[in-house]
Amino acid sequence: MSKILFSSFLIFSATFLGAVQIPTDTVQSRPFGATINVNAKVIQQKNDQHALTSSLEGYIEEYYVRAGDTVKKGSQIARLRSVALSKLAIDYQSLKTQYTHFDKNFQSDKALYERGMISRQEMTTKQIERDALLSQIKGIEVQLKGSNVNPTSLKNNGNSHYVYASASGRIGEILEPVGAFIKDEKVMATIINADAFYLQCYIPLKYSAQVQKGQKVLIKNNAPSAIYGQINRVLPSVDEATQRITALASLDKSTSLYLNQYVGATIYTQKDKNYLAVKKSALTFFQNEWVVFVPTVAKAHKEEKKEEHGKHEEHDDHEEEKAPYEARVVEIIAKDDQYVAVKGLKAGERYVSDKSYYVKSMLLKAAIGEHGH
């Protein structure tokens, strides 16, 4: 009975694997270089951090963001109660009222001048006075606009002054609390440009000759997807604290990284040796060994026949009662960002290049079935 059940399981497993497209590839020779595992720190250049300041002094009444929030350029960050803004508003409205009355009188005087009833000198003096008032108004408007205040909204704005994000990014730190008095371009908070992170790699001196500009760096931080960088500078001096050379790498993406975070990293040096290799996705840990799954002889023969005929042949589930794949133990020699150099496979041999967890699951269940046999 157990034989029948186990045989049925294998047939079911083969059917299941037949429904799932298991990708395969061939073992090929590829160039590899030495890999250097290093400690690294996520940093940012000073010019990639933006300081949030207010050009008008006042007391912070409210923040609309918290540290870590993502903001876009122009987002509202905080509201200040500004006596300076109140004074500007009063001066602005007063000057505009004066200008309205003065301009009305000026137009009347201009008509009298054209009729010869006012001298040129008197008319020139009045025009200078009118232009001076207009210049003061324009000066306040420039000051208001530079502080992101619309002059036309002053009546409804009162003494509330709003601070807006000067760039897109993440709020780094809130440096001044609610109630603090802000003046003299004091920094209230910082915005971190998450697209401008760098990796500061600390490299042992013995590898100094192997590290060069342009080499790939892989960050090890258990992120959902791999984060790569590229070395763009090797600093000319040794770091005194660590007695290591320092290399800076620009990052392709950094959404899952944090400023000042310490991570492990792998530097891929110049490729100068050839090894037989498989894709990284093919490697899996099975029964305490690193393995790559390969088709059995029967499975490989059937695949070859399909390729020869150039079409999909009908699969008879009853033809195979044995697992169509087997685990081949391999020895890892070298790695790069996509491939692993291994011993234990032959050039041109086919292997499961991805979705090996399906094959692994089938073999583990088959092993349980055998023990229960």
Image (cartoon, rainbow, N blue to C red):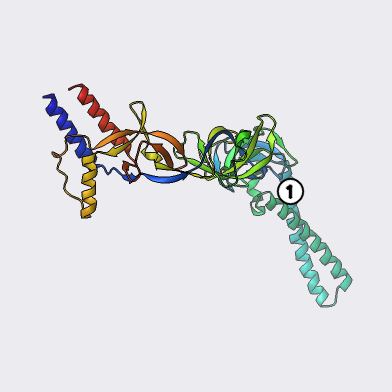
Task: Answer above or below: position of 130 versus 33.
Answer: below
Report the number of discs: 1
Q: Please, which residue is most extreme toward the bottom here? A: 115
Image position, residue 324 (x, y; %): 23, 38
Image position, residue 338 (x, y; %): 44, 43
- The answer to whether residue 272 is left or right of residue 137 is left
Q: Please, which residue is most extreme toward the top here? A: 372
Task: Answer above or below: position of 143 versus 344.
Answer: below
Q: Amino acid at mark 1?
A: Leu
- Quarter of the image for the N terminus: give it: top left
Image position, residue 89 (x, y; %): 71, 49
Between 40 and 66, the one nearer to me in the picture: 40
Residue 44 figure quarter: top right
Q: Is residue 24 visible?
A: yes
Mark 1 neighbour class, 10 Å CA radius: few under 14, some 14 to 19, many 20 or more: some
Q: Please, which residue is most extreme toward the left here? A: 1
Residue 200 figure quarter: top right
The residue at the point 46 percent across, 39 percent down is 335
The residue at the point 24 percent across, 43 percent down is 300
Image position, residue 31 (x, y; %): 46, 45
- The answer to whether residue 121 is left or right of residue 155 is right
Location of mark 1 (residue): 88
